[in-house]
Amino acid sequence: MLEEEEKKLFSITQEIGEVVGVENISIDDLNRSLYSYDASMIRAKPCGVIHIKKASDIQPVLKILYNHSVSFTPRLAGTNLSGGATNQKGGFVINLSALNRIIQIDTTNNIAVVEPGVVNIKLQEELEKFGYFYPPDPSSQKVSTIGGNIGENAGGPQCLKYGVTSNNVVKLDVILPDGTEATYSIEDYGPDIMSLFIASEGTLGIVKKAYLKILPIPKYFLTIYSEFKSLDDAMQAVADIIKQGIVPKSLEALDRLAIELTKTKDIEISDETQAVLITEIDSDDKREIDKEQNEILKIFNNNSAFNIKFSDDKKESEKLWKLRKETYPSLAKIANNILVEDGCVPRSELVNTVKKIKKIIDDHRLKANLVFHAGDGNIHPQIVFDERDVKETNRIRRVAKDILKEYIYSGGTISAEHGVGVEKRAFMLWQYDKKTIDLFRRIKKAIDKKEISNPYKKIPITNDLKKLKRKEFEISDNVKAMIEEIKTRHSKKIRSLICGKQTSIKTLPADHSILSSAPIQKILDFDRENLTITVESGIEIKKLKDFLINEEFYISLPDDNGTVGGMIAEKRFVGIRDLILSMDLILSDGSFIRLGGKNIKDTSGYDITKLMIGSLGTLGFITSATFKISKKIPDNKFTKPANITNYTSIGIRIKNAFDRENLFNAFLTEKVYGRYEI
Amino acid sequence: MRNYRNELYTHNLHLKELITKNGVKDIYDAVSQCTRCGYCLENCPTYLVGKKETLSPRGRNQIVRMLIEGKYTDVNTAKYTIDTCLLCGACTDVCYGKVQTEDIVLEARREEQGHNNSLIYKIIIYLKGEKKLFDICLKFLFFLHRIKLSYLADKLGLFYLLGYPSLSKGYKKLIKTPKKFLHTEIKHLTDETDIKWIYFATCGTDYLFTNVGRSSINVLKKIYGNGVFMNNECCGLISYNYGSLDDARKLATKNIELYEKIKAANPDAFIVGDCSSCIAFMKTYPQMFMDDENMYKRAVDFSSNVRDIIEVVKPEHIKNINFDYIKDKKVTIHHSCKAYNNQDLKTNEDDVLKPVLKENLIEMNESNLCCGGAGAYAFSEPEFSAAILSRKMTNISITQADITLVSATSCLMQIGYGSKTSYHTEVMHYIEFIDRIMV
Ligand SMILES: Cc1cc2nc3c(=O)[nH]c(=O)nc-3n(C[C@H](O)[C@H](O)[C@H](O)COP(=O)(O)OP(=O)(O)OC[C@H]3O[C@@H](n4cnc5c(N)ncnc54)[C@H](O)[C@@H]3O)c2cc1C
Ligand code: SF4
Ligand code: SF4
């Protein structure tokens, strides 16, 4: 290290030492070496480690780092699989593990308030005492923490019914990279900034406190274990369950090798078995359980399932679940290294994609098992190897890329729940076009001006790769025309008033021209097997609902005269964020932005889809949105946002990242984002 | 494919190979088996109190791997990570790869400390070979201790001699010295015939907790009938953990020879002892003889016949119960890590006591979490040691137990000390309790 740098590091260390105590900052080789890895294969030595013992120390520490422009990487249990917890720029790792206090459990409002270092299972154990649970249950829950789960948007078996981390967080206290404290909630008036922090992998600052949604444990549950003679049969059973409109709490699949490694004395599997499904249903109504059980059983029988076992006893069912939850660590029995792929595809593509991936694995004679959050379309091939063998490692990496491509070809995503980190950042370019990647870059820059918060993660550093041919719906001619129109307006700096049926904007503000979604009303994709529908934003809500009812499907939207686009932009009810999977939008310069697609899980980019909810047309023109639909009549509860305005300068910086010239709904900009300098 | 960069770890200072539950592996393969999944973190007492990677099993494995690969060069700067391991085995217990962190850590310690060349260690090893002299020295040190010169006794190596070189200072003062050593008391138990068991007196019971030994013998007689005292040598754990492997091998060899003599006339008799640490170690004797085929075989035979006292008492053995003694007593079990993790004896005590005590047997939270007494635990940062004990005492206090049962003598000391300084509970070896309830 140069003398100059050494001096600088020494002085920063001293400054930080004054805040956290000298014993809690380490720049020795031991600490640097042991904070150079996480559960992925990525390595990078930080310049030092800061051990935070009090949440109130985060803010002053970040301030110091910001002043010196030194980078930092927040870290908790270090179990992420994409290199997220390593510092790639030689800055500090900030160890937050000691912040493990459960601050409040409020069963009246169904909220738990926790520090980021609370281990997922510890929270579950505490909640269980009150008869409650927190739905996200990653297989790593025995060690991984709420902060890490938020950082990666972790999912788990229960997420099929109850949603992933982002569906179960209601408010976050964060420290932004410049040391500013801020609180964002799903109830905020304006865009859903809170959602940007989920799956942000520590690139937008540090979560200091999280307010989580908790739920009463349903009265009844039933775990169903079933074996199949082929993986194809098992996948077909999954597809049939989803198609039937049954949403089990969990629907998980394992192949033979996975079972062999995790199975205990308690479980006998037959020689013929090639796949196992573990399904769980739950409800407060026993009749519903019985009904679903019968339906599922019928499907299983149609797909030649055998050795079917049922359990409604917690201990018994835990044994069955152990089989699934420990598939990853159990690979340590046979290997030193495991490469877990983590793609998600539309469920209608599951059977096909699994076949293709299986073929790649067989063709390359890899030792790999396949486990899936099958109900979500989330496929995890887990390939074992020994990284000490460089040639073999390179071969595995090449094969892994082929697998990633399969997800993308099927319209899927390269990351469902493990994040992008360093491992997959380049492959973002296979999934997104350059304009969308650039938008991600601008969002990062808007919040982290100096690019010091977990740098070089999530977003590709170069533009070396090209978007692959991905199964996606076509852009309609009317949208194409609209892109041209917006480009023209951009060149002439004409301001637009974005509207649907103009239901809430009664008078046209001066110097704005109307940009209406009225011409775009198509149903772009209706996927019965995936339980999704993609519609253009100008379609009326009533029309959409009628269409679905005709097809015997339902969508949980309130009766409203307006358009789909208007409902999203105005965030007419809080729960809309849990219904929308993805969007297309046009920015004020005419860039067309296509987000994730119709995947149930996606942690590939920043969650722009949710950010757009409540953006009131100030960020971009939403051209289409993909919604989850169901076969059952939903029990509609529509809570209005509390309209808390709680903005820091971030709001306006995000506006800048989308619409630098303030051409979209300019008259609203100040109202939405407050009076910050542009 | 394999690429050793630091040949030191193949030196004879180290074990040739480790026998792990996941196969026989040399140290490099054994340590490379760690996938860094982190599953072990929340099971490790030092990580739980420190919440740092440098205090975690994963960190310990990674630093040794880096040392072997030459990516980290100075083992002495890794002391904080290496020396703080309690060797409690809790990490291996939950690890699918069965990565034997404690053995891996010991290899690094051997690299760091070499074969212990300190004068005191040499004297002790010499004395261990000269039993009579050993007894005299120990008696003298006990005398010093009794007349309140415990500081001097400590300096002269009392606790080293006992096998607990780094016991907490507070406890050293509290130690009660027995009037008579166990081996002198049970000498007569050497020439019985038709024997079923061979009693192995561990140092802790022999020289300090003689009551425990008496109870073991009582219970063994009641359950199994005739048995003998092995008149054994120290198991060698202290050399294995703190000294040279060769010394440990010598002691192991002597014990194997002693056993073989008895076995000749009594082929079905099993060896049994009452300190889970020593017993767990004796079960791993074969690992020290991987480059000597003959000794390896003999060690396997020896080890497969070693039993922990907690595994030989079965529920059906408890027939007549002293109800007066157990009346209204709440009891909890601290699962000594060397039984629970290393020997996989997870429910033995509960299976026996649950039917007897029913609701008065109170389950302890984190019952298998090491109390900080495992082996002999030198903590460079005393507040950690205190924090680990304090966590254990909190868990005990939640049970409100009158009696806390343990199965290793180091737990008797450590939790015994905790009970004097924080929550008061009677700390007792499991076998003493069994002895009292069996009529
Ligand atoms: C055996 C095993 C099984 C797994 N199973 C699953 C599974 O079923 N589902 C799943 O989704 N994942 C799974 N994972 C991946 C991993 O456990 C998750 O990504 C988990 O959420 C990481 O949590 P952590 O506490 O280890 O965080 P870390 O790995 O320490 O950090 C994760 C990311 O979050 C950032 N971060 C950490 N703390 C903060 C904070 N306070 N504020 C902002 N950013 C922060 C970090 O910089 C990093 O980018 C598994 C991993 C393993 C090893
Ligand atoms: S020791 Fe085992 S449990 Fe711990 S990180 Fe390594 S492989 Fe995982
Ligand atoms: S042996 Fe015990 S103290 Fe050492 S790393 Fe394993 S769990 Fe931690």
Image (cartoon, coloured by chain):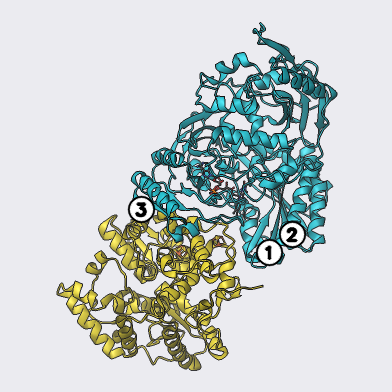
Chain colours: A cyan, B yellow
Nearer the observer: mark 2 or 3; the answer is 3
Q: Is A111 displayed left or right of A458 in the figure?
A: left
Q: Identify the subunit bearing mark 2.
A: A
Residue located beneath label 1 in the image: A385
Q: Quadrant of the N terminus of chain B?
A: bottom right
CA gap, disc 2 and disc 3: 49 Å
Mark 1 — on which chain does it sit? A
Q: Viewer-nearest of labels 3 and 1?
A: 3
Mark earlier in primary sequence (2, 1)? 2
- In terms of secondary structure, where does tag 2 sit? helix
> Which structural element holds mark 3?
helix
Residue corresponding to mark 2: A256
Identify residue for label 3. Answer: A23
Q: Is residue A68 left or right of residue A321?
A: left
Q: Earlier in the sequence, mark 2 or mark 3?
A: 3
| Figure check: B159 above or below A429 | below
Q: Where is residue A133 in the image (x, y as percent from the top left)?
A: 54, 40
Residue at left 39%, top 43%?
A54
Q: Looking at the picture, how far across and down is residue A508, in whole percent?
A: 67, 7
Q: Position of residue B438 (x, y in %)?
A: 38, 70
Q: What residue type is labelled 2?
A: Arg
Indicate whether A248 appears above or below B279.
above
Residue A620 found in image quarter: top right
Residue A404 is situated, as x and y percent measured from the top left of the image, at 74, 49
Q: Residue furthest left?
A: B147
Per the image, label 1 sits on a secondary structure element best described as strand
Asked if ligand 1 lies within 8 A of label 2, the reply is: no
Confirm whether residue A317 shows in the render.
yes
Sooner in the amino-acid sequence: mark 3 or mark 1: 3
